[in-house]
Image (cartoon, rainbow, N blue to C red):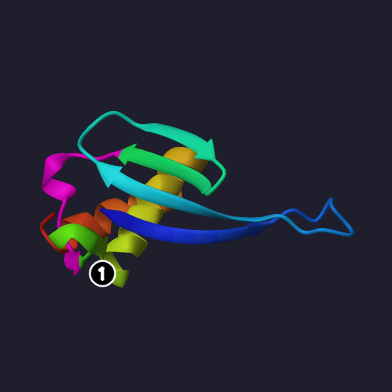
Amino acid sequence: MFNIWKIHTNPLKLKQFITFIHIISITTLKTTSFVNDFGEYSYKNVKENLLFGYDLKPMADNRTIQFAIPEKALLDLLMNYCVKFQSKALDHRVKLLLKTYDL
């Protein structure tokens, strides 16, 4: 499920700016990431009960891809920040959000 697309610009190059895309996906598989010429891709592990809140979008070859709705993308981002920054206040708010919506 795709969540967040970020555009990064490298300010160190004065004459030429390098821009790339960072795509963060959530999965029940292991967390991993890689970079190639097209951008940076991250896969974040979540519990299976948190795989909800997405729309199916058509792709080529009659395939579909799961895109998170904005509210779900925000929830995933907050959960990622809780892990990354180890903020007790943010962690408390996310747990409250999960409890409020019975997730």
Report x, y in % for residue 100: 17, 63
Q: Is residue 94 left or right of residue 59?
A: right
Quadrant where the C terminus sits is bottom left
Residue drawn 77% across the image and 59% down it: 17
Amino acid found under the numbered disc labelled 1: Ile
Q: Which residues are magenta?
A: 45-57
Question: Element under label 1?
Answer: loop
**50 magenta-colored:** yes
Report x, y in % for residue 45: 28, 36
In the rendered view, tell whether residue 21 sits above or below residue 37.
below
Residue drawn 44% across the image and 34% down it: 33
Report x, y in % for residue 72: 27, 63
In the rendered view, tell whether residue 30 sits above or below residue 23.
above
Total tally of numbered discs in the picture: 1
Packing grade of label 1 (10 A; few <14, some 14-19, many >=20) is some
Q: Is residue 93 visible?
A: no
**52 magenta-colored:** yes
Residue to which mark 1 is pinned: 69
Q: Is residue 70 left or right of residue 77?
A: left
Report x, y in % for residue 67: 26, 63
Residue closest to the eye, 40 or 94: 40
